[in-house]
Image (cartoon, rainbow, N blue to C red):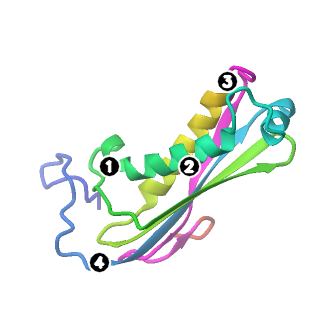
Amino acid sequence: MLTHLDSRGHAHMVDVTDKASTAREAEAEAWVRMRPETLELIQKGGHPKGDVFAVARIAGIMAAKKTHELIPLCHPLLLTGIKVELSAEGEDRVRIVARCKLAGQTGVEMEALTAASVAALTLYDMCKAVDRGLLIEQVRLLEKKGGKSGHYQAGQAM
């Protein structure tokens, strides 16, 4: 059942008034592929735009807080924790992992996915001058905890 549609099929924001407030967490990831020279430039601190990972991290955190302004029908949430980590993987990839949590009436999956996505977009924006071939790939939810639907982990059957 699609909860964002009313009985006439019109989109609406789900009313969570009667839902219990519970601890909720979500973790999402995104990957960015680039030329090995680009990743080396970032790692050595030689990128002309400065600390690329730091800027992407802050962008991801800001994006999580603004998810309700970007995605229609998302509730504004009082997030109690946001963590965005970027790490070089191999010679040509960056892995971005975003974690969001709160005690509330609705989940934080969209906030974690938005944080990972915007961090990846920021990485792309900062590096496009030195590498036009960057590729953002595999944005996905890794794990979700809490709420009525319970625990989900990527790779498990729903």
- Residue that numbered label 3 is attached to: 128
- Residue that numbered label 2 is attached to: 116
User: Which one is earlier in the sequence, the residue at label 1 or at label 2?
Assistant: 1
Give the spatial CA distance, label 2 vs label 3: 18 Å
Looking at the rendered structure, the kind of residue marked 2 is Ala
x then y, percent, for residue 23: 40, 78
x then y, percent, for residue 34: 77, 33
Q: Are marks 2 and 3 in contact (CB under 8 Å)?
A: no
User: Which one is earlier in the sequence, the residue at label 4 or at label 1?
Assistant: 4
Q: Are marks 3 and 1 in contact (CB under 8 Å)?
A: no
Span shown in magenta: 127-153
The local secondary structure at tag 4 comes to loop
* Label 4 crowd (10 A; few <14 / some 14-19 / many >=20): some
Looking at the rendered structure, the kind of residue marked 1 is His
* Label 2 crowd (10 A; few <14 / some 14-19 / many >=20): many
Q: Is residue 114 above or below residue 136?
A: below
- Residue that numbered label 4 is attached to: 21
Give the spatial CA distance, label 3 vs label 1: 28 Å
User: Which one is earlier in the sequence, the residue at label 3 or at label 1?
Assistant: 1
Q: Which residue is painted at 28% across and 56% down in the image?
A: 75
| Left or right of 150, for residue 124 | right
Q: Quadrant of residue 153?
A: bottom right
* 128 is within the stretch colored magenta: yes
In-front residue for pair 140/114: 114
